[in-house]
Image (cartoon, rainbow, N blue to C red):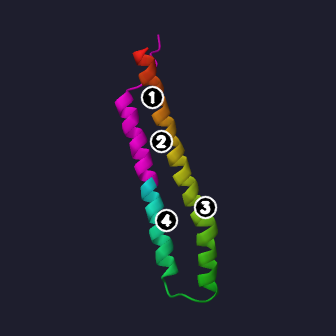
Amino acid sequence: MAVWGLDIQQVRTLSSQLSRQAETIQQALSTLTSALQGTQWTGPDAEQFRNEWSSTHTSNLKSVINALQEASQKAARNADAQEQASQG
């Protein structure tokens, strides 16, 4: 017989960790974008790099941030649902 359920506190901790890591990546994105903007670099290589950063790399990092935030919210909802089921 399979047992279904979760440890509410562990899943809430996981949710918090996911959220914190999303914040960490957001901060890294901001820091690196500022560093790039403050870097004296001209020419076609610089333009290509900045274009890649602002389109591809920034977009990819934002996708990771969103995925972590969504996972955090889903984990929190699952913990809430388990808590309500346990009380009912």
Residue 51 is left or right of residue 84, and the answer is right
Spot occupied by residue 43 in the image (x, y as percentages of width and height)? 61, 89
Which residue has dot 4 on it?
29
User: Relative to the observer, which residue lies in front, 44 or 66?
Assistant: 66
Q: Which residue is mark 2?
A: 72
Residue type highlighted by circle 2: Ser
At horizontal 46% and vertical 58% (from top left) the residue drawn is: 25
| Disc 1/disc 4 C-alpha distance (Å) | 31 Å
Q: Earlier in the sequence, mark 2 or mark 3?
A: 3
Mark 2 in CB contact with mark 3 (< 8 angstroms): no
- Residue of label 1: 80
Which badge, 3 or 1, is on the more N-terminal residue? 3
Task: From the image, state whether disc 2 or disc 1 is nearer to you.
Answer: 1
Q: Main secondary structure of the magenta part?
A: helix
Q: Is residue 1 above or below residue 4?
A: above
Quarter-of-image position of residue 44 = bottom right
Give the secondary structure at mark 3. helix
Q: Nearer the viewer, residue 65 or 52?
A: 65
Residue 80 spot, x, y in % from top left: 45, 28
Quick one: label 3 or label 4, which is nearer the N terminus?
4
